[in-house]
Amino acid sequence: MLRVLLSLFFLSAFASSSAAQTHFHHVHLNSTDPRAAIEFYTTHLSGAKAVFDGADAVWTQASWLLFNNVKQPPPSEVVSPLFHIGWGAEDMKAEFERQIKLGTTFQTVLTDGVELFGAGTRDRNFFMYLDGPDHVTIEVQSAMHHDFMHVHLFSDNPVAAAAGLDCTPHMSDGGLGYLYVAHFASCVPNAGPFQEYKGRDESLPVASDTSTLRCVNGMLKVPAGPGLGVTIDPAFVAKGEVIR
């Protein structure tokens, strides 16, 4: 999970007198090795080495990645509404292969969006989560470009909270979707008492050192650790075929 953002600032840039485009001015990250982090963002992703206010930084098309040198690794578990930062890719299968060749560690390997949402057209929209420097969660998803494109935050459903209503997370399909929902439910202050989790999908063998990944006495313990807090069985991964 992305737990190292320090600040987000919006900058409105007027492309014309009639239309305004809003983008992030910068994402500020804690890093135990800023130089290595900069190398990662400029080789694994579409960033360019640059200097901001006298310090080494990364320029990502319309926003900055800034780095604060720290001695202790920042926490990677869920401690704030910030989830991840994200880039696009025109050809996700080719990008997945490129990341493998670069030696990237994945929090979630290339996944068809249908597996998450349980609907849609297969082989059309993909996503994957990279384990970035200091365990920053970095999403790469299908897009018509390969630029930095979003900062993803958890929401506490402020409209429902203001109305005194419960937020009722549910997941009606298998795969790893229930883990996304479980992490979300663990963060919001108004999660309702009745939630839906279909449980583990045995077709995708995953394990956690901190959770059984099953409902026990009506409770599901959310796994801790980087990413979703689970590992995929290496033997299962070894059976996969290279996508070209």
Image (spheres, rainbow, N blue to C red):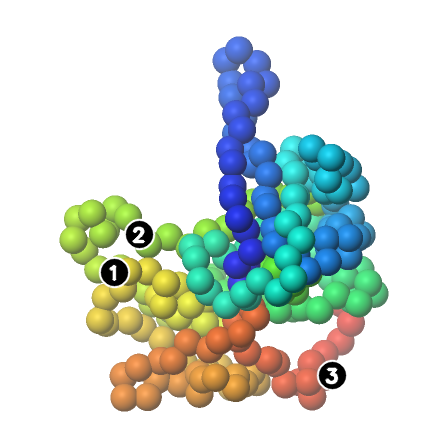
Residue at the image point whose x is 53% and y is 11% from the top: 17
Contact check, label 2 and label 1, Cβ < 8 Å: yes
Foreground of the two, 151 or 28 = 28
- When the figure is inspected, residue 147 is found, relative to residue 127, above or below; the finding is above
Check disc 1 and give the amino acid type.
Answer: Asn
Location of residue 65 in the rendering, given as x and y in whole percent from the top left corner = 66, 43
Check disc 2 and give the amino acid type.
Answer: Asn
Q: Secondary structure at mark 2?
A: loop
Check disc 3 and give the amino acid type.
Answer: Ala
Determine whether, in the image, residue 232 is placed left or right of residue 155: right
Foreground of the two, 43 or 19 = 43
**Mark 2 against mark 3, which lies toward the viewer?**
2
Q: Earlier in the sequence, mark 2 or mark 1?
A: 2
Q: Earlier in the sequence, mark 2 or mark 3?
A: 2
Q: Where does label 3 land, which residue?
A: 238
**Could you give the CA–CA distance between mark 2 and mark 3, rounded to whole angstroms?**
40 Å
Residue 190's tag is: 1
Foreground of the two, 229 or 77 = 77
Foreground of the two, 188 or 168 = 188
Residue at the image point whose x is 55% and y is 78% from the top: 230
Task: Say which quarter of the image contains residue 199.
Answer: bottom left
Total count of labels? 3
